[in-house]
Amino acid sequence: MTLSGNEINIAKELRRIQRELKAPKGQYNEFGKFHYRSCEDILEAVKPLLGEAVLTLNDELVLIGNRYYIRATATLQTGELCITSTAYAREEETKKGMDASQITGSASSYARKYALNGMFLIDDAKDADTQDNTKPKPEEKKAEEKKAKEKPLTGQEVIDSLKKKLAVKMGKMSLETKTDFYNYVIKEDTVTADKLQNFLDKYGAFYEAYKKMKESENV
């Protein structure tokens, strides 16, 4: 594929920002004893580097299975062209000390932060000089485990999880039928979490339509 001049320009702008961006970890978690950067830290660091480019963040609430996720999309735009990065964060059903709006806001901040991480190639791993290499105390281990569970899923991780659920439903099919049915439901389109969830919700209807199609082919 050959890029046009404008497409090359926006790609150059993104690469420039990625090279120049310095987003230090300006926050400190007293409970977990680690430094981290917030969504606001990244935004404050990137604003002076945007030049003529425009950066926007948008949230969308999506239902996947029986849980709600915040899907955040970061968009870098120059003129009519844009580059996007998406990340998901799951809302907790309950969270101590937070009401419903605060739970949604927390999930939104997580998802937006990871969408920005993907856009600007930010490594969110702990810095070496903030890590304690001694054996963690029980309470510290619990804090780390809790943090790992709360880490939002990326878009691809959500898609992979839904693919596994679809594979379980197709468990008794032969490999040839599985492949044929999977190709039938995705119809060569780009696979998204929304499409896969729709297939799972309407699995029976899709499978019946598929069987009728195969029967008509064999007549």
Image: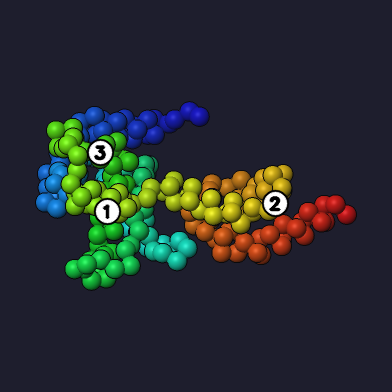
First of labels 2, 3 by sequence position:
3
Q: From this viewpoint, which residue is outermost toward the bottom?
A: 99
Q: CA distance from mark 2 to mark 3?
A: 41 Å
Decide which of 139, 45 is in the foreground and name it.
139
Q: Which mark is residue 64?
A: none
At label 1, counting other C-alpha atoms closer than 10 Å, the crowd grade (few under 14, some 14-19, many 20 or more) is few
Q: Is residue 206 left or right of residue 16?
A: right
Q: CA distance from mark 1 to mark 3?
A: 16 Å
* Local secondary structure at mark 2: loop
- Residue drawn 14% across the image and 33% down it: 129
In percent of width and height, residue 217 lies at: 82, 52
In percent of width and height, residue 143 lies at: 22, 52
Q: How many marks?
A: 3
Decide which of 99, 76 is in the foreground and name it.
99
At label 2, counting other C-alpha atoms closer than 10 Å, the crowd grade (few under 14, some 14-19, many 20 or more) is few
- Mark 1 or mark 3, whichever is nearer to me: 1
Amino acid type of the residue that numbered disc 2 sits on in the rendered structure? Met
* Local secondary structure at mark 1: helix
Residue indicated by mark 1:
146
Amino acid type of the residue that numbered disc 3 sits on in the rendered structure? Ala
Q: Which mark is residue 125?
A: 3
Q: Quadrant of residue 200?
A: bottom right
Labels 1 & 2 near each other (Cβ < 8 A)? no
Decide which of 147, 84 is in the foreground and name it.
147
